[in-house]
Image (tube, rainbow, N blue to C red):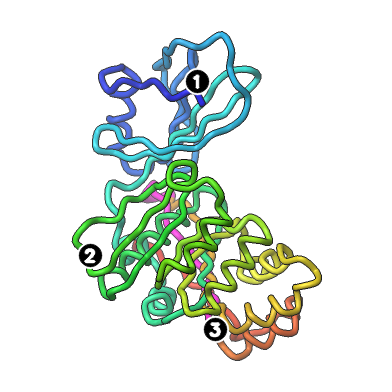
Amino acid sequence: MRLLDLPEDSPVALRIHELAAAEGVSDFYLTPGDYLTYKYNGELIFDPLVFEMAVPEHIEPGCDDSAMDMFNHRFRVSQMVTRGQLRWVMRLLPDEIPEPHQIKVPPPALKAILEARYGLFLVCGATGSGKSTTIASMVLHRAKRRREHVISFEDPIEFVYPDGLPSLVSQREMGTDEVDFAKALRSALRQAPDVIIVGEIRDGETAEIALQAAETGHAVVATLHTSSASQTIQRFLKLIPADRLETAQETLADTLRLVLCQRLLLDQEKSKRFPIHEVLLQYDGVTNIIRRGDFKKNRSGTGDRLEARDV
Protein backbone atom coordinates (compact mmCIF):
# COMPACT_ATOMS: atom_id res chain seq x y z
CA MET A 1 0.00 0.00 0.00
CA ARG A 2 1.22 3.50 -0.87
CA LEU A 3 0.45 5.70 2.14
CA LEU A 4 -1.11 9.10 1.57
CA ASP A 5 1.60 11.75 1.99
CA LEU A 6 -0.23 14.82 3.27
CA PRO A 7 1.79 17.03 5.65
CA GLU A 8 -0.44 19.23 7.80
CA ASP A 9 1.37 22.38 6.65
CA SER A 10 0.77 21.65 2.94
CA PRO A 11 -1.67 23.92 1.02
CA VAL A 12 -4.07 21.04 0.31
CA ALA A 13 -4.08 19.92 3.96
CA LEU A 14 -4.80 23.49 5.13
CA ARG A 15 -7.62 23.77 2.58
CA ILE A 16 -9.10 20.47 3.74
CA HIS A 17 -8.93 21.74 7.32
CA GLU A 18 -10.82 24.87 6.28
CA LEU A 19 -13.47 22.94 4.34
CA ALA A 20 -13.91 20.32 7.08
CA ALA A 21 -15.27 23.02 9.37
CA ALA A 22 -18.08 23.79 6.91
CA GLU A 23 -21.41 22.00 7.32
CA GLY A 24 -22.33 19.74 4.42
CA VAL A 25 -18.80 18.75 3.33
CA SER A 26 -18.37 14.96 3.42
CA ASP A 27 -15.70 13.56 1.07
CA PHE A 28 -12.38 14.69 -0.40
CA TYR A 29 -10.79 13.26 -3.56
CA LEU A 30 -7.00 13.54 -3.91
CA THR A 31 -5.18 12.72 -7.14
CA PRO A 32 -1.51 13.73 -7.54
CA GLY A 33 -1.22 16.54 -10.10
CA ASP A 34 -4.98 17.13 -10.21
CA TYR A 35 -7.46 19.52 -8.58
CA LEU A 36 -8.63 18.94 -5.04
CA THR A 37 -12.23 17.73 -5.31
CA TYR A 38 -14.83 17.39 -2.57
CA LYS A 39 -18.52 16.78 -1.99
CA TYR A 40 -20.81 19.43 -0.59
CA ASN A 41 -24.32 18.23 0.26
CA GLY A 42 -23.73 15.25 -2.00
CA GLU A 43 -22.58 17.27 -5.05
CA LEU A 44 -19.06 17.26 -6.46
CA ILE A 45 -17.08 20.51 -6.25
CA PHE A 46 -13.72 21.18 -7.97
CA ASP A 47 -11.37 23.36 -5.96
CA PRO A 48 -8.74 25.34 -7.93
CA LEU A 49 -5.98 24.05 -5.64
CA VAL A 50 -3.81 21.28 -7.17
CA PHE A 51 -2.66 18.35 -5.04
CA GLU A 52 1.11 17.90 -5.42
CA MET A 53 2.74 14.65 -4.35
CA ALA A 54 5.74 12.60 -5.46
CA VAL A 55 4.49 9.53 -7.31
CA PRO A 56 6.48 6.26 -7.42
CA GLU A 57 7.39 4.82 -10.80
CA HIS A 58 5.77 1.48 -10.01
CA ILE A 59 2.24 1.53 -8.58
CA GLU A 60 0.86 -1.69 -7.15
CA PRO A 61 -2.70 -2.43 -8.27
CA GLY A 62 -5.61 -2.85 -5.89
CA CYS A 63 -7.49 -0.95 -3.21
CA ASP A 64 -6.84 -0.46 0.47
CA ASP A 65 -8.73 1.13 3.36
CA SER A 66 -7.32 2.89 6.40
CA ALA A 67 -8.07 5.76 8.78
CA MET A 68 -6.10 8.87 9.64
CA ASP A 69 -6.28 11.82 12.03
CA MET A 70 -5.46 15.35 10.90
CA PHE A 71 -6.18 18.70 12.55
CA ASN A 72 -8.30 16.96 15.19
CA HIS A 73 -10.46 15.53 12.41
CA ARG A 74 -10.72 11.82 11.64
CA PHE A 75 -10.98 10.51 8.09
CA ARG A 76 -11.68 7.12 6.58
CA VAL A 77 -9.26 6.81 3.66
CA SER A 78 -9.78 4.53 0.68
CA GLN A 79 -6.94 4.16 -1.82
CA MET A 80 -7.55 3.16 -5.43
CA VAL A 81 -5.70 3.06 -8.75
CA THR A 82 -7.40 4.64 -11.77
CA ARG A 83 -5.77 4.25 -15.19
CA GLY A 84 -2.44 3.60 -13.51
CA GLN A 85 -2.74 6.64 -11.24
CA LEU A 86 -3.18 6.77 -7.47
CA ARG A 87 -6.30 8.37 -5.99
CA TRP A 88 -7.48 8.65 -2.41
CA VAL A 89 -11.01 9.26 -1.16
CA MET A 90 -11.14 10.74 2.34
CA ARG A 91 -14.47 10.46 4.16
CA LEU A 92 -14.78 13.13 6.87
CA LEU A 93 -16.08 11.61 10.10
CA PRO A 94 -17.77 13.53 12.93
CA ASP A 95 -15.33 14.79 15.55
CA GLU A 96 -17.34 12.98 18.21
CA ILE A 97 -19.93 10.24 18.10
CA PRO A 98 -23.21 12.20 17.93
CA GLU A 99 -26.12 11.71 20.27
CA PRO A 100 -29.07 9.87 18.66
CA HIS A 101 -31.30 12.95 18.72
CA GLN A 102 -28.64 14.96 16.88
CA ILE A 103 -28.84 12.66 13.86
CA LYS A 104 -32.59 12.02 14.17
CA VAL A 105 -32.45 8.32 15.07
CA PRO A 106 -36.12 7.23 15.29
CA PRO A 107 -37.11 6.64 18.94
CA PRO A 108 -38.60 3.15 18.22
CA ALA A 109 -35.26 2.03 16.76
CA LEU A 110 -33.32 3.43 19.72
CA LYS A 111 -35.73 1.79 22.17
CA ALA A 112 -35.32 -1.56 20.41
CA ILE A 113 -31.52 -1.60 20.64
CA LEU A 114 -31.48 -0.23 24.17
CA GLU A 115 -33.92 -2.71 25.68
CA ALA A 116 -33.20 -5.96 23.82
CA ARG A 117 -30.89 -8.39 25.61
CA TYR A 118 -30.09 -10.23 22.38
CA GLY A 119 -31.04 -10.33 18.73
CA LEU A 120 -30.04 -9.09 15.28
CA PHE A 121 -30.11 -5.38 14.41
CA LEU A 122 -29.57 -4.38 10.76
CA VAL A 123 -28.85 -0.80 9.68
CA CYS A 124 -29.13 -0.38 5.92
CA GLY A 125 -28.74 2.21 3.21
CA ALA A 126 -26.57 3.30 0.31
CA THR A 127 -22.91 4.22 0.64
CA GLY A 128 -22.62 7.61 2.31
CA SER A 129 -26.06 7.48 3.95
CA GLY A 130 -24.60 7.56 7.47
CA LYS A 131 -24.95 3.92 8.51
CA SER A 132 -21.69 3.84 10.49
CA THR A 133 -22.58 7.06 12.29
CA THR A 134 -26.02 5.74 13.23
CA ILE A 135 -24.59 2.47 14.56
CA ALA A 136 -21.91 4.23 16.61
CA SER A 137 -24.50 6.61 18.06
CA MET A 138 -26.94 3.85 19.04
CA VAL A 139 -24.25 1.55 20.47
CA LEU A 140 -22.71 4.38 22.50
CA HIS A 141 -26.17 5.31 23.79
CA ARG A 142 -26.52 1.73 25.05
CA ALA A 143 -22.95 1.52 26.37
CA LYS A 144 -23.54 4.60 28.53
CA ARG A 145 -26.55 2.98 30.18
CA ARG A 146 -25.49 -0.63 30.64
CA ARG A 147 -22.48 -2.56 31.94
CA GLU A 148 -21.56 -4.77 29.02
CA HIS A 149 -18.70 -5.92 26.82
CA VAL A 150 -18.91 -4.49 23.30
CA ILE A 151 -16.73 -5.99 20.54
CA SER A 152 -16.51 -4.35 17.13
CA PHE A 153 -14.89 -5.61 13.91
CA GLU A 154 -14.07 -2.67 11.65
CA ASP A 155 -12.18 -2.10 8.41
CA PRO A 156 -10.90 0.43 9.34
CA ILE A 157 -11.86 1.77 12.79
CA GLU A 158 -13.84 4.91 12.06
CA PHE A 159 -15.24 6.15 15.36
CA VAL A 160 -13.20 5.81 18.54
CA TYR A 161 -15.45 5.23 21.54
CA PRO A 162 -14.68 7.45 24.55
CA ASP A 163 -13.05 6.27 27.75
CA GLY A 164 -14.82 6.22 31.08
CA LEU A 165 -17.90 4.27 29.98
CA PRO A 166 -19.62 1.78 32.31
CA SER A 167 -19.22 -0.70 29.43
CA LEU A 168 -15.98 -2.19 28.12
CA VAL A 169 -15.44 -1.59 24.38
CA SER A 170 -13.00 -3.75 22.37
CA GLN A 171 -12.51 -2.22 18.91
CA ARG A 172 -10.70 -4.53 16.50
CA GLU A 173 -9.36 -3.41 13.15
CA MET A 174 -9.02 -5.91 10.33
CA GLY A 175 -5.47 -6.12 9.04
CA THR A 176 -4.06 -4.61 12.23
CA ASP A 177 -5.66 -6.51 15.10
CA GLU A 178 -7.03 -9.43 13.05
CA VAL A 179 -6.39 -11.04 9.67
CA ASP A 180 -9.14 -13.63 9.21
CA PHE A 181 -12.51 -11.95 9.70
CA ALA A 182 -14.66 -15.08 9.98
CA LYS A 183 -12.24 -16.77 12.38
CA ALA A 184 -12.05 -13.65 14.54
CA LEU A 185 -15.82 -13.36 14.60
CA ARG A 186 -16.23 -16.97 15.69
CA SER A 187 -13.59 -16.48 18.39
CA ALA A 188 -15.47 -13.44 19.66
CA LEU A 189 -18.29 -15.72 20.79
CA ARG A 190 -15.85 -17.12 23.39
CA GLN A 191 -14.79 -13.68 24.62
CA ALA A 192 -17.90 -13.00 26.71
CA PRO A 193 -19.37 -10.22 24.56
CA ASP A 194 -22.80 -8.73 25.08
CA VAL A 195 -22.84 -6.60 21.90
CA ILE A 196 -21.05 -7.49 18.65
CA ILE A 197 -20.68 -4.94 15.86
CA VAL A 198 -20.02 -6.89 12.69
CA GLY A 199 -19.85 -4.07 10.17
CA GLU A 200 -21.07 -5.10 6.73
CA ILE A 201 -22.42 -8.61 6.16
CA ARG A 202 -20.96 -9.57 2.79
CA ASP A 203 -21.08 -13.37 2.63
CA GLY A 204 -22.94 -16.41 3.84
CA GLU A 205 -20.39 -17.36 6.48
CA THR A 206 -20.64 -13.95 8.15
CA ALA A 207 -24.45 -14.04 7.95
CA GLU A 208 -24.57 -17.46 9.60
CA ILE A 209 -22.16 -16.48 12.39
CA ALA A 210 -24.22 -13.33 13.03
CA LEU A 211 -27.37 -15.45 13.31
CA GLN A 212 -25.62 -17.89 15.63
CA ALA A 213 -24.44 -15.04 17.86
CA ALA A 214 -27.89 -13.44 17.94
CA GLU A 215 -29.47 -16.79 18.79
CA THR A 216 -27.06 -17.53 21.64
CA GLY A 217 -27.71 -14.40 23.66
CA HIS A 218 -25.79 -11.56 21.98
CA ALA A 219 -26.95 -8.28 20.48
CA VAL A 220 -25.49 -8.26 16.96
CA VAL A 221 -25.39 -5.00 14.99
CA ALA A 222 -24.53 -5.08 11.29
CA THR A 223 -25.07 -3.26 8.00
CA LEU A 224 -26.25 -4.19 4.52
CA HIS A 225 -26.25 -2.11 1.34
CA THR A 226 -30.00 -2.26 0.73
CA SER A 227 -32.72 0.34 0.31
CA SER A 228 -35.78 -1.16 2.02
CA ALA A 229 -36.65 -3.47 4.91
CA SER A 230 -38.10 -6.18 2.66
CA GLN A 231 -35.07 -6.08 0.39
CA THR A 232 -32.79 -6.30 3.43
CA ILE A 233 -34.35 -9.51 4.69
CA GLN A 234 -34.32 -11.11 1.25
CA ARG A 235 -30.70 -10.08 0.62
CA PHE A 236 -29.66 -11.51 3.98
CA LEU A 237 -31.31 -14.86 3.27
CA LYS A 238 -29.83 -15.05 -0.24
CA LEU A 239 -26.40 -15.15 1.36
CA ILE A 240 -27.23 -18.41 3.13
CA PRO A 241 -26.43 -21.70 1.31
CA ALA A 242 -29.57 -23.45 0.04
CA ASP A 243 -29.10 -26.54 2.22
CA ARG A 244 -29.23 -24.41 5.38
CA LEU A 245 -31.72 -21.79 4.26
CA GLU A 246 -34.77 -23.21 6.02
CA THR A 247 -33.01 -23.32 9.38
CA ALA A 248 -31.57 -19.83 8.88
CA GLN A 249 -35.02 -18.48 7.98
CA GLU A 250 -36.45 -19.83 11.22
CA THR A 251 -33.58 -18.36 13.23
CA LEU A 252 -33.88 -14.99 11.51
CA ALA A 253 -37.61 -14.88 12.23
CA ASP A 254 -36.92 -15.51 15.92
CA THR A 255 -33.92 -13.22 16.38
CA LEU A 256 -34.47 -10.20 14.10
CA ARG A 257 -35.22 -7.23 16.34
CA LEU A 258 -34.79 -4.26 14.01
CA VAL A 259 -34.22 -3.24 10.41
CA LEU A 260 -33.44 0.46 10.09
CA CYS A 261 -33.09 1.72 6.51
CA GLN A 262 -32.02 5.30 5.99
CA ARG A 263 -31.16 7.73 3.23
CA LEU A 264 -30.30 11.41 3.07
CA LEU A 265 -32.33 14.07 1.28
CA LEU A 266 -31.39 17.68 0.61
CA ASP A 267 -33.36 20.53 2.12
CA GLN A 268 -33.00 23.15 -0.62
CA GLU A 269 -34.04 26.05 1.62
CA LYS A 270 -31.55 25.26 4.39
CA SER A 271 -28.92 23.85 2.02
CA LYS A 272 -28.37 20.85 4.28
CA ARG A 273 -29.21 17.18 4.19
CA PHE A 274 -31.57 15.36 6.52
CA PRO A 275 -32.30 11.64 7.04
CA ILE A 276 -35.49 9.72 6.39
CA HIS A 277 -35.95 6.25 7.85
CA GLU A 278 -37.92 3.06 7.40
CA VAL A 279 -38.20 1.10 10.63
CA LEU A 280 -39.13 -2.58 10.79
CA LEU A 281 -39.65 -4.02 14.26
CA GLN A 282 -40.30 -7.56 15.49
CA TYR A 283 -44.07 -7.75 15.33
CA ASP A 284 -45.87 -11.11 15.08
CA GLY A 285 -46.80 -10.32 11.48
CA VAL A 286 -43.16 -9.68 10.58
CA THR A 287 -42.04 -12.92 12.24
CA ASN A 288 -44.63 -14.97 10.34
CA ILE A 289 -43.77 -13.38 6.98
CA ILE A 290 -40.05 -14.14 7.45
CA ARG A 291 -40.77 -17.70 8.58
CA ARG A 292 -42.91 -18.32 5.47
CA GLY A 293 -40.66 -16.35 3.14
CA ASP A 294 -43.70 -14.40 1.97
CA PHE A 295 -42.04 -11.09 1.04
CA LYS A 296 -43.93 -10.05 -2.07
CA LYS A 297 -47.24 -9.21 -0.46
CA ASN A 298 -47.56 -5.67 0.84
CA ARG A 299 -48.93 -6.08 4.35
CA SER A 300 -49.80 -3.07 6.45
CA GLY A 301 -48.56 -2.92 9.99
CA THR A 302 -45.27 -4.71 9.32
CA GLY A 303 -43.18 -1.60 8.99
CA ASP A 304 -43.27 2.10 9.74
CA ARG A 305 -41.80 4.83 7.54
CA LEU A 306 -40.58 7.59 9.76
CA GLU A 307 -39.23 10.90 8.57
CA ALA A 308 -36.84 12.69 10.89
CA ARG A 309 -36.38 16.19 9.58
CA ASP A 310 -34.75 19.16 11.25
CA VAL A 311 -37.52 21.76 10.99
User: Which badge, 1 or 3, comes first in the chain's sequence?
Assistant: 1
Residue beneath label 1, please? Answer: 31
Please report the bounds of the magenta region as a residue range: 268-281
User: Which badge, 1 or 2, comes first in the chain's sequence?
Assistant: 1
Measured as percent of width and height from the top left, residue 310 is found at 35, 61
Measured as percent of width and height from the top left, residue 308 is found at 41, 66
Residue found 44% across the figure and 55% down from its top: 132
Pick the residue in front: 128 or 214.
Answer: 214
User: Which badge, 2 or 3, comes first in the chain's sequence?
Assistant: 2
Q: Residues within 10 Å of mark 3 (few under 14, many from 20)?
A: some
Find residue 224 and report its image quarter. Answer: bottom right
Assess whether mark 3 and mark 2 are in contact (beta carbons under 8 angstroms): no
Pick the residue in front: 204 or 299.
Answer: 204
Element under disc 1? loop
Residue beneath label 2, please? Answer: 165
Residue beneath label 3, please? Answer: 282
Q: Residues within 10 Å of mark 2 (few under 14, many from 20)?
A: some
Residue flagged by tag 2: what amino acid is it? Leu
Element under disc 2? loop
Residue found 56% across the figure and 80% down from its top: 255
Residue found 31% across the figure and 20% down from its top: 7
Q: Nearer the viewer, mark 1 or mark 2?
A: 2
Magenta stretch encompasses residue 276: yes
Position of residue 124 in the picture relative to residue 75 (left or right): right
Residue found 23% across the figure and 69% down from its top: 166
Element under disc 3? loop
Find residue 25 and report its image quarter. Answer: top left
C-alpha gap between disc 1 and disc 2: 40 Å
Find residue 236 and report its image quarter. Answer: bottom right
Assess whether mark 2 and mark 1 are in contact (beta carbons under 8 angstroms): no
Residue flagged by tag 1: what amino acid is it? Thr
